[in-house]
Amino acid sequence: MIVNQLSKIINTERDVEWGNGRSRRFLIEKDGMGYSLTDTIINAGTESLLEYKNHKETCYCIEGEGEIEKDGQIFPITPGTMYALDQHDKHYLRAKTTLRLVCVFDPPLQGHESHNLNGNESSHY
């Protein structure tokens, strides 16, 4: 069994600054679950052009307000909204207020990855 707490992740190697926020990684590849689980903060007023060529991601909003834009179509994000990037979708993520998302990655993150905010993956994303 794996049990973890956010308070034990903050300010460790699992608390990753990614440019426009933080990704607190509860589960990573070495935990052996076959997926990653993160508590992700997106800073208010930011826009991130993202694309995951090596991962699929599902996000569930638990705090804040923002939007996703894909191919000119805009989808509002508020608490209770889930979105899944099932086609390695290139998209803009905009945070009107500070957003907090619970995210699942498949395959799992190794743990140290961070975003390249021009829409290209970093070395492992």
Image (spheres, rainbow, N blue to C red):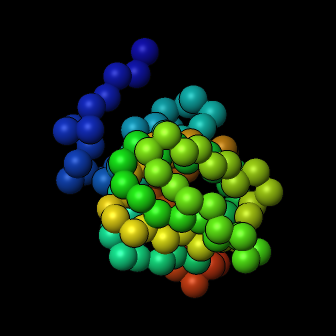
Q: State how many labels appear.
A: 0
Location of the C terminus by quadrant is bottom right
Residue at image point 59% right, 73% down? 92
Above or below, comparing residue 68 to residue 2 in the picture: below
Pinpoint residue 11: horizontal percent, then vertical percent: 20, 53
Q: Is residue 71 left or right of residue 95?
A: right
Residue 75, quarter of the rendered image? bottom right
Residue 74, quarter of the rendered image? bottom right
Instruction: Give the farthest residue toward the right.
Output: 87
Q: Nearer the viewer, residue 88 or 71?
A: 71
Pinpoint residue 14: horizontal percent, then vertical percent: 34, 50
Residue at image point 72% right, 70% down? 73
Q: Is any atom of residue 55 visible in this view?
A: yes
Q: Is residue 11 left or right of residue 26?
A: left
Residue at image point 43% right, 15% down? 1
Q: Is residue 70 left or right of residue 87?
A: left
Q: Nearer the viewer, residue 93 or 21?
A: 93
Instruction: Give the farthest residue toward the top.
Output: 1
Pinpoint residue 64: horizontal percent, then vertical percent: 37, 55
Instruction: Give the farthest residue toward the bottom.
Output: 118
Q: Nearer the viewer, residue 36 or 101?
A: 101
Q: Is any atom of residue 21 visible in this view?
A: no
Pinpoint residue 39: horizontal percent, then vertical percent: 39, 46
Q: Is residue 119 left or right of residue 44?
A: right
Residue at image point 27% right, 31% down? 5
